[in-house]
Image: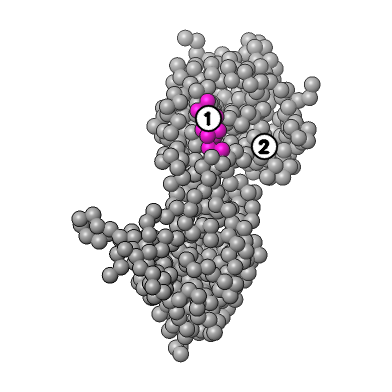
Amino acid sequence: MTDYNFAYLDEQTKRMIRRAILKGLAIPGYQVPFASREMPMPYGWGTGGVQVSAAVLTPDDTFKVIDQGADDTTNAVSIRTFFERTAGVETTTATSEASVIQTRHRIPEEPLTEDQILVYQVPIPEPLRFLEPRESETRKMHSLEEYGLMHVKLYEDISRHGHIATSYAYPVKVEGRYVMDPSPIPKFDNPKLGDMPAIQLFGAGREQRIYALPPYTQVVSLDFEDHPFEASKADHACGLCGATDSYLDEVIMDDQGGRMFVCSDTDYCEARRAAGHKGKDAA
Amino acid sequence: MRPLLSVQGITKRYGAHIGCADVSFDLYPGEVMGIVGESGSGKSTLLNCMAGHLPPDAGQVVFDTRADGPKDTITMSEPERRMLGRTDWAFVHQHARDGLRMGVSAGGNVGERLMAVGERHYGDIRGKATDWLERVEIDAARVDDRPTTFSGGMQQRLQIARNLVTGPRLVFMDEPTGGLDVSVQARLLDLLRGLVRDMGLSAIIVTHDLAVVRLLADRLMVMKSGRVVEAGLTDQVLDDPQHAYSQLLVSSVLQV
């Protein structure tokens, strides 16, 4: 063990964050202010998610971190190491074995269970921010349920691009009440937000907000009657594992225009390859 | 006939200074009321108190709501008042920039109130927006342009379209022609007069331009130092002013 308290934060701070989490769970989609602490990493690297994870971790947990779906990118590796050193918890890259999963910009492909907690890193928690810069006004809009402005953004999308071009951080309405920013996950993941058996917690460190979705919450993506919501992905199969149902990253292979599409969820892709599935680009 | 808006004893103080004091009047459906006075006479304070932007220190603003009949808008709950503000009421600002979203296209600006009251069909919203742009004499081809690319007069007309799209019954206007050159003013006034007559709107127009009230208003109130010094039919007040200040105001207008 180290000289740090379990999971880096002191117990009083964790209590404060847990209270914010409980309030967030009691009012799904409502942004609860909390006294965000300075963490040993820059803002924008997941300081909110790390604090939420620290508050919910127990010594028996198994921890997994993904960044854009991958377990092996800088952000994921450094946060995983951080908790290995300060909390001494087990870590894993297998979605099904983890009890707490911290994620940046993706929901794992494998369905989650009631025994799991999904922690999101959120850069800008306020879905109305770019339409209404005043915090006092957006709070009033949330409290009075005035969400017409959110549709103005979608209207602008259609009038400019002919379809709703927002492809990530796509706004959702929670239990018919609060409009929520699901963090910058691709809209392909939006349908997974609703009715999920796992607890979903959202932490925004710089903006000092925590919000949450309890298990089996109703989550609806906003749209127009004549331009319905569509969960989109690249129209290809994974080049490595051949999956046609997973969200894909486009990887540029050379400067001759060569490209390849691979699962963004590395664990999902590896598990499929281990089970013998093979894509067209697999060596 | 029941008044659409009944204002009783509206008073607003800024510390020891009086914003407006003890203003009362009734506004009937289809009537246009003009409020004139010099700068600092309390016209805008009064307008903002009536429109719910400022809480008055005393008085009542009773509006004849569609659902529940006459109701005091000062004491009603904030959600109710804000709902009125985007359905039955409209507010035209002096500077179009205050009333428009400059980063959103003209169509989005007009459609915002529709979406705010629950319209969720893109085609319908766009159709109504285009229709309203034409009614305020803006080329429908500019529906996707931002207001920043519009001239001052066009911005003001866009602001009017944006406000009238939900078919309000009462329009508050704060110097609607301020800052526009005279030929543009004339067109705007012509347009406003047409819309007010066609839609049977009631309106309260605050201005210091007597020509505007002469053209638009049925009745007139003259304010000085926060108090109403004279009120009556527009032609009567302008042609035969009784109070010394009204006489000064009328005689100050340059005759070309």
Q: Which mark is residue B127?
A: 1
Which residues make up the magenta segment? B121-131
1 vs 2, front mark: 1
Is B221 drawn above or below residue B62 in the view shown?
above
Image check: B207 left or right of B26?
A: left
Residue at left offset 59%, top offset 56%: A219
Q: Is residue B125 magenta?
A: yes
Callout 1 crowding tier (Cα within 10 Å): few <14, some 14–19, many ≥20: few
Residue at left offset 60%, top offset 38%: B119
Amino acid type, mark 1: Gly
Q: Residue furthest bottom?
A: A1
Residue at left offset 45%, top offset 63%: A106
Q: Quadrant of the N terminus of chain B?
A: top right
Mark 2, secondary structure of its residue: helix
Q: Find disc 2 in the rendering and name its residue.
A: B84
Q: Nearer the viewer, residue A187 or B66?
A: A187
Amino acid type, mark 2: Leu
Q: Is residue A175 magenta?
A: no
